[in-house]
Image (spheres, helix red, strand yellow):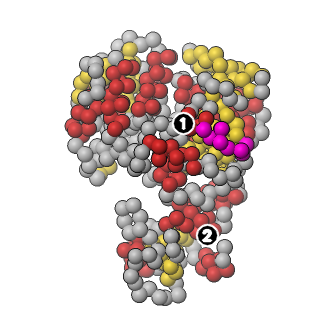
Amino acid sequence: MSEDLLKIFSNCIGITSDSRKVKAGYIFLAYPGHYQDGRNYIQDALKKGASYIFYEPQNFETDLNQLNFIPITNLKNQVSIIASEFYNYPSKKIEVIGVTGTNGKTTVVGWLQQALTLLNKKSAWIGTLGYGDSKKINNTLNTTPDAIVIQEIINQYVSKKYSFMAMEVSSHAIQQKRIEAVNFGAKILTNVSRDHLDYHSSLQEYQKIKKSFFASNASKFYVINADDEIGKQIIKEKNVKIISYGLRNNADLVARNIVYDKSTTFDLIFRNKKYHVSCNFFGAHNISNLLSVITTLIGYQFNIDEIIHCAGKLKPICGRLERVFLKQAENTNIFLDYAHTPDALEKVLLALKETFAKKIILVFGCGGDRDPGKRKEMGIIASKLADHIIVTSDNPRSENPAQIMLHIVSAITTPYVMIENRSEAIKRAMQLINHDNILLITGKGHEEYQEIEGKKIPYSDRETVLRILKKNGTT
């Protein structure tokens, strides 16, 4: 850090790139973003009492020559570094575990936080559900917040003397360098399949971005899924310490003899020794997620017997194969899941088929203004694995929900019903439930809104199900 910057930071109380958050004594970072150009809000920031303006000078004509106006070339890509310096490098004072992958990030981060707490380590998380600890979760706008907010959150938990922070790392965050100055003690790869092709130019580009997260050798170790094709490439290419896990392929930690019953059990093979594991969730994808957690904790040299004991106490994550019921009817077979990619939908349907000898009623849709190519893929998967299909609206955003639904059903080869109103679709599905089937509602999981024409309208799959159960007098 230069002496000039150090002096500026010492005279300021906060830093932000959002003019709405500026207060007296703040530094305002102004640069072109994806949707807005922050330089258009410099005057707003000044009116709110900003002490300094750091701005991107390229393609910006201005007469800003005051001492508190500082031009920084390529500012957008340096925000993480600047924020880290402002907060005095907080990620060097806590073990940050970064989790990337198409699916499973939220579950892995949540279980890491739970397990570390059970192991008597003060720990927090950042991800799709927000940020916080076992006592309180705060909302965030993105899976991985902006570069300044990340550093601010980490600093909060450093000041509270926390030992660990588990963080979801999205492909957007990697490409936009939001995590550039985060010091990761460990990095985890869950899996890589099709997603975000509305943002990335191709699947190959998306895979390349995910792999780039593991390009640095600064971390203590990597935890890699040996069943994943990109995981195999990383294992083959890297010379750093890698601990691998898997269900199918050879790996450092392997799950064998998986049995789904009232609880799930399997044998964990590590260093030619067998350990018996019991957990409270089902599905091969969740066993894989759990393996990544166990592998990470072994990497941090926790006692393996204590780790396995903690595994049996882990609780399901909100909106991830979450069973919804009234207390009077805990055996109601209604499940919610956030699955919104072809791979995730396939895995959750297979998990239910492997665990329950019942037919599956599926309610699902696809989001608007996102990769349209996955709509037909998800329709094909639904045809193969679901027994009764109801296609509905998800988060249509600016698109016509009826057109999205038509894209999906164009690939469905079995009988289906289209009901655009999501609440009505769920109501119809719940009328079909009997002892021989189960209901799976996918796409929204934990979300408490529907995004329609630029507005987030309050809505919850969970609350919809509970309301119908109560109205029906389920006992």
Task: Tell me the quarter of the picture where residue 298 sits.
Answer: top right
- Which residue occupies 40% across, 76% down? 59
Q: What is the C-alpha distance between the residues marked 1 and 2?
A: 34 Å
Amino acid type, mark 1: Asn
- Which residue occupies 36% across, 30% down? 378
Task: Assign the C terminus to one quadrant of the image.
Answer: top left
Q: Position of residue 249 (x, y in %)?
A: 63, 25
- Which residue occupies 54% across, 28% down? 285
Q: Is residue 133 above or below residue 381?
A: below
Circle on res. 191: 1
Magenta residues (range): 233-241
SS at mark 2 in the image? helix
Q: Is 406 displayed left or right of 337 in the figure?
A: left
Q: In this orientation, does residue 108 appear?
A: no
Task: Assign the N terminus to one quadrant of the image.
Answer: bottom right
Q: How many marks?
A: 2
| Front-lying residue, 93 or 193 | 193
SS at mark 1 in the image? loop
Amino acid type, mark 2: Phe
Q: Nearer the viewer, mark 1 or mark 2?
A: 1
Q: In this orientation, does residue 60 appear?
A: yes
Circle on res. 86: 2
Q: Position of residue 172 (x, y in %)?
A: 47, 52
Q: Position of residue 377 (x, y in %)?
A: 36, 31
Circle on res. 336: none
Callout 2 crowding tier (Cα within 10 Å): few <14, some 14–19, many ≥20: many
Callouts 1 and 2 close, C-beta under 8 Å = no
Q: Is 307 displayed left or right of 36 in the figure?
A: right
Q: Position of residue 313 (x, y in %)?
A: 64, 29
Mark closest to the chain's N terminus, 1 or 2: 2
